[in-house]
Amino acid sequence: MIVPSIDLMDSNAVQLIGGETKAIDAGDPRPIADRFGRVGETAVIDLDAALGKGSNADVVTELIARAPCRVGGGIRSVDAAIKWLDAGARKVILGTAATPDVLRELPRKRVIAALDDKDGEVVTNGWTRRTGVGIEERIDVYSNAESVRRSIEEQRGVYYSRSRGGLWAKGESSGNTQHLLAIDTDCDRDALRFTVRQQGTGFCHLGTTSCFGDASGLAALDTTIARRIADAPAGSYTRRLLDDPSLLLLANWQCARHALNMLRMCAKFSTSLPYASWSDPQ
């Protein structure tokens, strides 16, 4: 996932290298926010606040009103985080203050814990304070040769967990297991994509299908239908379809026609089925 970012210093959009050297001064951040806002959330970071050298709060407030923003930089308390959320920030980004005591007081779906590093070491307070902790030590779950080998052999999602000190099969304790269907590499062969059939409530520990929130579009419809099949009330249309094969066959033929029409409509409006929305008729 790529999230565009606007770093602020002295009310201008800038780029700092390592929190020290100003490489770019792009001037007024407002037109940049307008452009970035067309593709989703923009991360707005107040570098002056992060470095303890001032504040760009007025500019940040303006940007929040212009585009969907996640706000970070110098947010060191629960009150400061809530202030930005109340001001309209979609999310707040915490680095130095991303401690359990602070995080537990904030809505978890609207908080991002961020890590800054310098030469592979985690740094805080606007890159000015070294922690002695390697950045890789903060990454808990990933794939290595052994976990991939076990995934293929056992046909399930198996990963290496740093906190557990060894291999971890997804769903061992929660029951939300993954049946492995395929493992693919990207074009550069430096990243893996696991295609799995997720069991249980979902992949995320929050009970959602993925760590990017609730499913939408066709995926949401598929989830709803599966739930209805598992617990379709007597007399409902879903129950009638399940109990009457001839009616289900007729419905399949009608759905095929509707799906073709949906594809035509999506093509007309320059979209595709995975991004089409639907409403639940109950």
Image (cartoon, grey):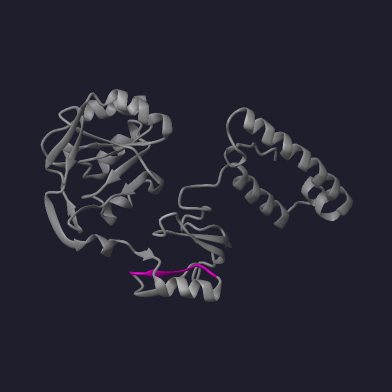
Residue at coordinates 87% horizontally, 48% vertically from top-left? 247
x, y percent for residue 59: 24, 26
In the rendered image of this protein, does residue 60 appear above or below residue 140?
Answer: above
In the rendered image of this protein, does residue 149 appear above or below residue 76?
Answer: below
x, y percent for residue 71: 29, 37
Foreground: 34 or 79?
A: 34
Foreground: 86 or 94?
A: 94
x, y percent for residue 51: 13, 41
Instruction: Determine the image quadrant of residue 26.
Output: top left
Foreground: 77 or 227?
A: 227
Res. 51 in view? yes
The quadrant of the image that shows the C terminus is: top right
Spot the residue most to the front: 188
x, y percent for residue 278: 63, 37
Residues rendered magenta in the picture: 156-162
Residue at coordinates 30% horizontally, 35% vertically from top-left? 84
In the rendered image of this protein, does residue 163 appear above or below residue 219?
Answer: below
The answer to whether 246 appears left or right of 143 in the picture is right
Spot the residue most to the right: 246
Instruction: Determine the image quadrant of residue 242.
Output: bottom right
Res. 231 in view? no
Residue at coordinates 67% horizontally, 30% vertically from top-left? 265
In the rendered image, residue 130 lying in the magenta stretch gets the answer: no
